[in-house]
Amino acid sequence: MSAFYEIANYWGVAILLLVGLHGMLARPNLMRKLMAMNIFQVAVILFYLSFAEKTGASTPVAPHGLLHPLAADFINPLPHALMLTAIVVGVGTTGVGLALLVSIYRRYETLEEPELLEKMRRENA
Amino acid sequence: MMQPLDTMFLALLIVIAVAALEAGDLLAAVILFGAFSFFSATFYALVGALDVAFTEAALGAVIATVFFVSAIRRSSKAARKRAR
Amino acid sequence: MLLDAVPFQDTIGLAAQLIRRAMPAMVLIPLGAAMLSPILAARSPRAARFFGGGALLLNFFLSLLVSNLVWWQGPIHYHFGGWAPPIGIEYSVDAVGAMMAPLVAFFALLSFASASRLEKEWTPSHGGAFQALYLLLSAGLMGIVVTGDLFNLYVFLEISSLSTYALVAAGEDRAKVAAFRYLIIGSVAATFWVFGLGYLYALTGTLNMADMAERLPAVIGSRAAVAGLAFIVAGLAIKMALFPLHGWQPDAYTYAPPGAMPFISAIMAKVSAYALFRVLYDVFLKAGPAGEALELLGWVAALSILAGSVLALGQRDIRRMLAYSSVAQIGYVLLGFSIGNAFAVTGALLHMVNHAVMKSCCFAALGAFRAKTGRADVDGVAGLAKEMPWTAAAFTIAALGIIGIPPLCGFFSKYYLIRGAVQASAWPFVAVFGVSSVLGTVYFFRIIESLYLRSADQGAKREIAPLSVIAPALLLAGLVLALGVFSQDVVGNFVPIIVGAGGPS
Amino acid sequence: MRSLSWIAVLFTGVVLFYTAPSLPPIGDPESPASSHVSPYYIENSVSDMATPNLVTTVVTDYRGYDTLGETTVIMTAGLACLLILGFWTPMRRHPTETDRLSFGSPVLDAAARLLVPYILLFALYVLFHGHHSPGGGFQGGTLLAAGVILVRLVRGRDCGWGVDREQAVRLACSGAFLYYAVGLITMLMGHLFLDYSKLPLPLTAAMRRNMGILGVEIGVTVAVAGTMILIFDCLHATPHEDREAEVSAERAGAEGHT
């Protein structure tokens, strides 16, 4: 049974990643593409955190006064540091995406990709 | 052992992610997306990554959801008002 | 204060020591200038523009000094925060990095001048944001070139991507839709890079390129390492706009503002190709499965060359045609890497330099044509050779260079690529080079013919294109000629060092 | 677009499920990730820089250059939003009647008046206590921005409480520049960039690193707060032409009801 749990996280990450990727490419509504992008990034964060775990280790903050913490007692802090960066990059990209969406809406009055492409084609002709 | 709880939470996350993308109205989708961020922050705390959980809760759930709601407000209400 | 920290030997030793200590300033100068631009622009936009231009000029000189030192004394390493790798982050510039750094700095400086003229976005309402984003783009690209740490490369990839989305979106109305599609596909690429890096980190425990190169052979057998490589290569293929994943590039190039185009078109894809060179030859070279991966990449590159050339044939809009031609040209570079022997890699690296010069010359000339007639399609430039003889000559030189006519630099890089393919007896690839050169001749001559032979329709409105928009085009055309004529020296002294130091035998 | 998405999902799915079992099992202490570099971080953080929070030490000191790039990414996002949506109505210090109509109500106003001071105080606590407990630059900056955004939501769109738009741009850039300057000081003194132990402070090397981390955290907080407020203002504020249409529509609506 424990073999299943050892890679259960990776199955969950894989499914979440596929949901996000499909949502980004196939969803007609542009706003939902941005939501799917965030789900895609949360999947990567879960992936990094799952191989940072150590059984029997506590959260990576040394208790007060402990001068020489042992490596086996604490979770690996490096993926946590990397994932702080990934979250903040995700929110930054979402902010820029939403700014683009607002300016697209003000010009074309729609956020559905089929309608948008139709309006742009009509203007080209 | 924390494992059964993690796996259950992961399943919950997947369900909410699919629900957020499938929701009918855009605003409902954004609210579900906010819930998705909160639950992912809880999962990070469960896994032991407290700093990441704090950031995800503060940034992903609060700020990103406010950005989405204000963007939706700017891209639908204005049209209805002008269209009237 | 600075001098006493550096032990005084002879003046040369001191200068080398100073350059070695100042190497990360190649990224930090544009970074700091970008942070100060909005604050300075609030007071006076003119001062902010001089400040930005001065920063890029200083950056270009520093990159020349650093690359000379690297070619003379070997790679430079710099440990941030006083922590040696794999604990801390490391910058390492070797012979290949020393070739790319001046290239990035030169194009940042050159098209900064034309961007500042063509863009009406320099108005105070944007508070220096356009200039800050331009400087951040050049800092991000330089950061990718000189970094020795894989996650640090992701952070600077993200900086350059975000600033490119904004620079593309600053164009006309349709540019915002193109920028949004580029944002979605670009963030898929960046997240694939992080995901692949997660696999490699899980197997080796380190993020430093050199350290990972040592630890990979032990774990290369496991499927996870191949998956990591697959995700990283897929992410970079999107950034390089290789054939199946190039959907975002034609729109982004067509609707982007003309000022930023010479820089974006020349350097973005090349830096991603450089990152792929780093991953394939520095990290995975000792590990071994790169053989099969390179074989597969070779076929993808060949497909990209043919598809790019064919798609470029049917385009009326010159910018879209140049975008598809870029898809084909980056296929040359990737094909050179995948063939793998000394000539092919030399040809690929030389082609990166040559194509950057030729493609940005095309876009600079096109920017001048557009400033004159306001149109950028084949009929729009009809008969312009009489009114703008110099710019038309510049465009023709660049076009002939891309096709590969002997005196120009494009011919020499293709010569090395073909010679490498022949030496590796990869006959299908040699055929691909030939076919794409023929297709290139067809779609470029259509424009040259329209420029020179067709008569201009008198009715169209004509403004006077400012000299500062024409000057970059002429300068680049001169560079195309110079790189061609002196190609033997260019190849003679610096490319073999690359093959000796970085690339394969 | 639809067929491309199915191919991409299929390709990614095959690679994921095919290679998942060969990754090291989750939680085993001997996996390469937990045995190669991270033991150094865990064992030496407290002695190197007197900071028990191991994640903060990795974020701001061992891999401090990553976080400088990270702060620059946040500033880039803010400037990008400024460039794309840059034209907004000038801010007014005091909310006008139309603002009150569109958003505010006594209950919201009273709640905000109670909540905001504690949010900002907690943000400062999170920033300064980042060495010892989970928290630090990013979290503190986000909470500062959340406090200011809460007032904007309650008071209505164009009321510039606390930080108005031009100040938000300067805040974002100067926060990133503060982080950059802390690194530049040691570089100009002839040492390595971001080497806090060489900062000109009369303390031991570990405490100098501790102070360096604090200075850098303040820079990150200011940058993140400024950027989040800037992005919110770009998304939330009304551009010129919408403003007139909206005010006239509301006035028409008000006459219609009375």
Image (cartoon, coloured by chain):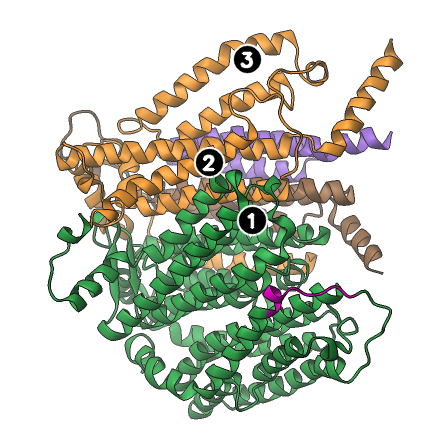
Chain colours: A brown, B purple, C green, D orange
Identity, as a three-letter code, of the amino acid under mark 3: Ala
Q: Is residue B84 left or right of residue C119?
A: right
- For disc 2, the marked residue is D172
Mark 3 surroundings: few (<14), some (14-19) or many (≥20) residues within 10 A: some
Mark 1 surroundings: few (<14), some (14-19) or many (≥20) residues within 10 A: many
> Is label 3 or label 2 in front?
2
- For disc 1, the marked residue is C130
In the foreground, C110 or C495: C110
Please identify the quarter of the rendering in which residue D139 is found. Answer: top left
In the foreground, C218 or D156: D156
Identity, as a three-letter code, of the amino acid under mark 2: Ala
Please give the chain letter of the residue carrying mark 3.
D
- For disc 3, the marked residue is D112
- Image quadrant containing the N terminus of chain B: top left
Q: Position of residue A59 (x, y in %)?
A: 29, 32
Please give the chain letter of the residue carrying mark 1.
C
